[in-house]
Image (cartoon, rainbow, N blue to C red):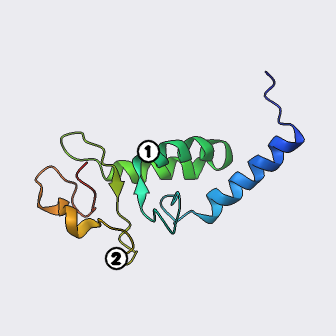
């Protein structure tokens, strides 16, 4: 298998890079801004792989942003909420999870409890 891209693959890669750029929030990438506006650990792992070939600086920022939400007990949460978004941008939001009440939750970062 060749590491070179064919014409069709190059066009696909360029389209994927445009989506990654368009969905960049400044600290992470929204997998689907209208449906999933926050940072999901599953998505961020795959997004990081794509960004590593496109924008290594953003790949690093993506994963650092995700690990900001890591709990003291080692748990990496399913969702790291974007504090700049309307609190009604997604349900269930941080007000339902109330992670700030948990002793192992990170301070200053709202996350899910999963």
**In this orientation, which residue lies closer to the viewer: 70 or 14?**
14
Q: CA distance from mark 2 to mark 1?
A: 22 Å
In the rendered image, the vertical position of residue 75 relative to residue 16, given as above or below: above
Binning the other alpha carbons within 10 Å of mark 1 as few (below 14), some (14 to 19) or many (20 upward) gives few
The residue at which mark 1 appears reads as 42
Please report the residue visible at 63 percent of the width from the left and 65 percent of the height from the top: 22
Residue 20, image x and y in percent? 62, 57
Residue 73, image x and y in percent? 18, 40
Residue 85, image x and y in percent? 40, 75
Residue 43, image x and y in percent? 48, 48
Q: Quadrant of residue 89?
A: bottom left
In the rendered view of the protein, which quadrant contains the N terminus?
A: top right
Q: Quadrant of residue 108?
A: bottom left
Circle 2 — which element? loop
Indicate left or right for 21 with 65 as reference.
Answer: right
The mark total stands at 2
Please report the residue visible at 35 percent of the width from the left and 55 percent of the height from the top: 79
Indicate left or right for 2 with 51 as reference.
Answer: right
Q: Quadrant of residue 107?
A: bottom left
Question: Residue most toward the top?
Answer: 1
In the rendered image, the vertical position of residue 17 relative to residue 24, given as above or below: above
The residue at which mark 2 appears reads as 88
């Amino acid at each position: 298998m060749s590491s070179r891209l064919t014409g069709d693959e190059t066009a696909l890669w360029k389209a994927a890079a445009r989506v990654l750029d368009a969905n960049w929030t400044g600290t992470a990438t929204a997998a689907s801004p209208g449906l999933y506006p926050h940072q999901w650990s599953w998505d961020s792992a795959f997004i990081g792989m794509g960004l590593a070939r496109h924008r290594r600086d953003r790949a690093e920022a993506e994963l650092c942003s995700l690990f900001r939400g890591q709990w003291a007990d080692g748990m990496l949460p399913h969702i790291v909420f974007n504090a700049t978004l309307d609190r009604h941008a997604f349900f269930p939001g941080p007000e339902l999870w109330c992670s700030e009440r948990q002793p192992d939750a990170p301070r200053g970062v709202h996350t899910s409890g999963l």
